[in-house]
């Protein structure tokens, strides 16, 4: 079967696009490893219009319910390994391979929307991999409850790190936010104010971790000033890396961060190939921005498939 549009990714961008694609009467298929996306690990969302305060998982569920109400065909648990495109004389179609070797499955479509989001960026220091899930975590919402009454650190200086510190403070005895910069300039003022007003959160600026150590569990970290800090848990929030590694053959234009470069209508340099959400070069990574980009991509796919593209 040849689809009109295949959406890769089941987060805010992909799910929003799927609703619009169905409304445009496109023959659409959504492929994803899991439904919900990055927003599911967000404790509270208070900046999405229509929901004064809602958990990230609840908001994701609303997106999923909306897509299912529109009978969007979905394949969940799909890991994309390769995308390529035929030459114009051979149909100009996109081919998407999921899985490897004998278990591989290939899908064909006239247009594609990539909305795979990002994965956690690692510190790349000794002990990080060894103590993963044994005191090193990348999600306060997921793992904060395991550190009830303990002392933890969170590494990072962006808005996400500040919000994660607030989640951890609900469980831990004390939270220390460690950041290499001189100030937390990227945090939203409202979140920074909340953090500064929380008694069991402190900051340690102009500092880097050089090693994580312990026995069966994390017991402490080494800092770049030569000191050691006893600690029970390390939460890492130093940014994310776009999931675009399988696009090499397609030659989609990327920036130096590996993000796909799109225009104001979610179009890439490859005709019929769109991108939306955190995997793109859009500066402001927000759920509402991702959803908007997904909707734009669905519209451009409709224009392309229907022949209405100018």
Image (tube, rainbow, N blue to C red):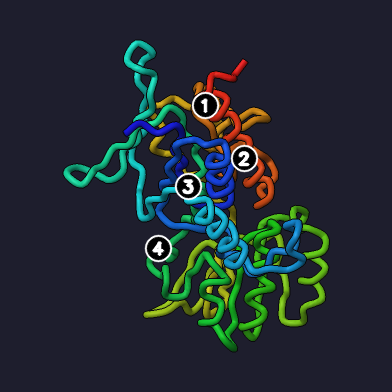
According to the image, label 2 marks what residue?
295
According to the image, label 4 marks what residue?
129
Disc 3/disc 2 C-alpha distance (Å)? 14 Å
Is 96 or 131 nearer to us in this picture?
96
Q: Residue furthest bottom?
A: 149
Regarding mark 3 in the picture, which secondary structure is present there? loop
Q: Sequence order check: which comes first, mark 1 or mark 2?
A: 1
Do residues under tags 3 and 2 come within 8 Å of each other at their CB atoms? no
Residue 99 higher or lower than 113, as above or below: below
Regarding mark 4 in the picture, which secondary structure is present there? loop
- Snapshot quadrant of residue 91: top left
Do residues under tags 4 and 2 come within 8 Å of each other at their CB atoms? no
Q: Is residue 260 left or right of residue 34?
A: right
Residue 120 in picture, x, y percent from top left: 51, 55
Nearer to us of marks 1 and 2 is: 2
Residue drawn at point x = 16 percent, y = 44 percent: 102
Disc 1/disc 3 C-alpha distance (Å)? 19 Å
According to the image, label 1 marks what residue?
253
Residue 180 higher or lower than 31, as above or below: below
Nearer to us of marks 3 and 2 is: 2
Regarding mark 1 in the picture, which secondary structure is present there? loop
Disc 1/disc 2 C-alpha distance (Å)? 21 Å
Q: Is residue 306 left or right of residue 295?
A: left
Q: Residues within 10 Å of mark 2 (few under 14, many from 20)?
A: many
Is 227 or 75 nearer to us in this picture?
75
Q: Sequence order check: which comes first, mark 3 or mark 4?
A: 3
């Amino acid at each position: 079967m040849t689809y009109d549009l295949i959406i890769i990714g089941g987060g805010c961008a992909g799910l929003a696009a799927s609703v619009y694609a169905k409304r445009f009467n496109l023959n659409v298929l959504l492929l994803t490893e899991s439904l919900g996306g990055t927003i599911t690990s967000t404790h509270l969302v208070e900046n999405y219009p229509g929901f004064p305060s809602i958990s990230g998982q609840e908001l994701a569920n609303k997106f999923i319910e909306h897509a299912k109400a529109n009978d969007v065909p979905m394949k969940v648990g799909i890991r994309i390994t390769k995308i390529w495109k035929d030459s114009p004389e051979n149909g100009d179609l996109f081919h998407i391979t999921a899985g490897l070797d004998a278990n591989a499955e290939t899908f064909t479509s006239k247009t594609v929307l990539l909305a795979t989001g990002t994965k956690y960026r690692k510190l790349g220091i000794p002990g990080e991999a060894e103590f993963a899930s044994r005191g090193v975590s990348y999600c306060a919402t997921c793992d904060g409850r395991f550190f009830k009454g303990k002392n933890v650190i969170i590494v990072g200086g962006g808005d996400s790190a500040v919000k994660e510190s607030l989640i951890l403070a609900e469980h831990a005895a004390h939270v220390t936010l460690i950041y290499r910069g001189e100030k937390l300039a990227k945090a939203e003022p409202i979140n920074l104010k909340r953090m500064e007003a929380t008694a069991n959160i402190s900051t340690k600026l102009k500092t880097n971790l050089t090693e994580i150590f312990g026995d069966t569990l994390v017991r402490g970290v080494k800092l770049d000033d030569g000191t050691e800090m006893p600690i029970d848990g390390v939460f890492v929030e130093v940014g994310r890396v776009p999931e675009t590694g399988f696009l090499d053959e397609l030659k989609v234009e990327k920036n130096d961060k590996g993000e796909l470069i799109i225009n104001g209508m979610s179009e890439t340099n490859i005709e019929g190939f769109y991108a939306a959400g955190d995997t793109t070069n859009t500066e402001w990574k927000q759920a509402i921005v991702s959803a908007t980009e997904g909707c734009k991509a669905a519209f451009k796919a409709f224009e392309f498939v229907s022949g209405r593209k100018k």
